[in-house]
Image (cartoon, helix red, strand yellow):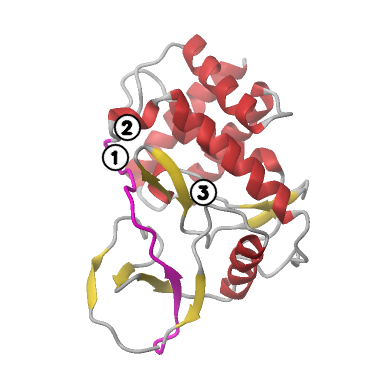
Amino acid sequence: MRRVEESEPLPGGNTAPVVRVGDTVRRVAGPWTPRVAALMTGLRAARVPYVPKHLGLDERGREVVEHVEGEVPVYPMPPWLWQDAVLRDVGRALRRIHDATLHLDLPRHGWRREPVEPVEVVTHGDVAPYNCVFVDRRLVALIDWDHAVPGPRLRDLGVAAYRFVSLTPLGHPDGLELTADEQWRRVQVLCEAYGDVAPVDVVHWAALHLEDLVVTAANPDHVRLYVGDLAHVRSLLA
């Protein structure tokens, strides 16, 4: 690949720097990168939207992925991000991606983490607004696939519910001021868009995701937020 002058680092990249180079995005590769490349390439071959092109490695050994033009929301989130239409877009996108992975011949091991049981599909792993690209407030791409791993459909849905429904307590600095009833209603919107899943199961997996974040997050301030969010999600299930 020809050398192109690098731009400023892009938002995100919590585990490694992410930079834009021309019409590509580059990040540090790892042993899991061939698996991610096979997943993204297979989904595109199956004509699944929402997946940028994976372009291999550059001369510095970094992963190279197509840059998708659009808006990537970051905290504090824009008000439009909380519309029901966004929940429906996310639910439909995940259903299409998950169903397509059933037809891909991908290994169970060699990803960034070990498979999450019960393995049903290959999950994105971090379905959050800051890993989504929107154009005219419609979802056009999921980015940052490096945490993809075989696992249950509900794993992605639990992560998405936590981030897009805003399964957070009142007073949360990054959340919405929602009653428990409204949170359950919004989970139902996500579930109806995806199909064949129960809101209580999705919220259960949101709790499992938060338990994982409490253990793995490096930033103490984030850990404190996750502990509070976990207590709130558990209260919804009580």
Asked which secondary structure carries label 1, the reply is loop
**Tag 3 residue:** 126
Q: Are marks 1 and 2 in contact (CB under 8 Å)?
A: yes
Q: Of the residues shown, which amino acid type is indicated by label 2?
A: Asp
Q: Quadrant location of the N terminus?
A: bottom left
Q: Of the residues shown, which amino acid type is indicated by label 1?
A: Tyr
Q: Using the image as rendered, state which of residue 3 and residue 151 is in the foreground.
A: 3
Asked which secondary structure carries label 3, the reply is loop
Q: Which mark is residue 75?
A: 1
* Mark 3–mark 2 distance (CA, rounded to whole Å): 17 Å
Earlier residue among tags 3 and 1: 1
Q: Residue placed at 44% from the left, 75% from the top?
A: 64
Depicted 215 relative to depicted 6: above or below: above
x and y, in percent, of residue 223 in the image = 41, 41
Q: Which mark is residue 174?
A: 2
Does the magenta run of residues contain 160? no
Q: Please state the extent of the stretch shown in magenta in the rendering.
A: 59-76
Quadrant position of residue 73:
top left
Q: Residue placed at 74% from the left, 66% from the top?
A: 106
Depicted 103 relative to depicted 90: above or below: below
Q: Of the residues shown, which amino acid type is indicated by label 3?
A: Asp
Q: Report the side of 161 relative to 171 (left or right).
A: right
x and y, in percent, of residue 190 in the image = 57, 28
x and y, in percent, of residue 41 in the image = 61, 68
Depicted 154 relative to depicted 67: above or below: above
x and y, in percent, of residue 129 in the image = 41, 42
Residue 167 visible in the picture: no
Q: Using the image as rendered, state which of residue 92 and residue 186 is in the foreground.
A: 92
